């Protein structure tokens, strides 16, 4: 299953967060795979980032979260690609009526 983890940390925990990330490469379970990782500096807190990953079990997700401990604040969300999410809704195959076409047809008729 696909997940997005949002995290943030400050200067006071920068070293600990970096150490935990480097350790994770050796500790991560076989059911855990990174899809992408991105971090940016922001105002307050100074560091924010996301990790997009796949995990085979809740234990794999828990291991990831517990690995970082108090070095950062993290929220993990299950995710899906947009096309699969749209397809999962009932009636998703039926397109919605195009309202713009009807409006432009009325304007053309007035001219």
Image (cartoon, rainbow, N blue to C red):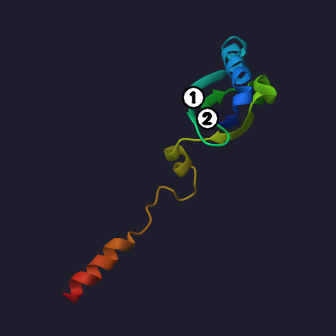
Q: Position of residue 25 (x, y in %)?
A: 66, 14
Q: Position of residue 39 (x, y in %)?
A: 57, 32
Q: Position of residue 90 (x, y in %)?
A: 57, 57
Judging depth in this view, the residue of 98 and 52 nearest the camera is 52
At 68% from the left and 36% from the top, the residue drawn is 8
Q: Is residue 59 visible?
A: no
Secondary element under disc 1, as helix, strand or loop, is strand
Q: Residue furthest bottom?
A: 110
Within-10-Å neighbours for mark 1: few <14, some 14–19, many 20+: few
At 53% from the left and 44% from the top, the residue drawn is 84
Q: Is residue 70 left or right of residue 109?
A: right
Within-10-Å neighbours for mark 2: few <14, some 14–19, many 20+: some
Q: Is residue 36 visible?
A: yes
Query: Spatial distance from mark 2 to mark 1, Cα to Cα?
Result: 7 Å
Q: Is residue 36 left or right of residue 26?
A: left
Q: Is residue 106 left or right of residue 2?
A: left
User: Which image quarter holds the N terminus?
Assistant: top right
Q: Is residue 42 above or below residue 98?
A: above
The residue where tag 1 is placed is 37
Secondary element under disc 2, as helix, strand or loop, is strand
Question: Which of the labelled discs sits on residue 49, or is there none?
Answer: 2
At 61% from the left and 35% from the top, the residue drawn is 50
Q: Position of residue 106 (x, y in %)?
A: 28, 83
Q: CB of mark 2 within 8 Å of CB of mark 1?
A: yes
User: Which image quarter holds the C terminus?
Assistant: bottom left
At 56% from the left and 27% from the top, the residue drawn is 35
């Amino acid at each position: 299953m696909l997940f997005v983890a949002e995290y943030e940390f400050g200067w006071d925990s920068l070293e600990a967060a970096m150490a935990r990330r480097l350790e994770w490469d050796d500790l991560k379970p076989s059911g855990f795979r990174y899809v992408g990782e991105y971090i940016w500096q922001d105002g307050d807190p100074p560091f924010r980032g996301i990790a997009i990953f796949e995990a085979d079990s809740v234990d794999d997700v828990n291991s990831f979260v517990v690995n970082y401990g108090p070095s950062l604040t993290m929220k993990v969300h299950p995710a899906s690609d947009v096309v699969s999410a749209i397809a999962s809704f009932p009636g998703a195959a039926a397109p919605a009526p195009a309202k713009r076409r009807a409006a432009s047809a009325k304007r053309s008729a007035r001219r």
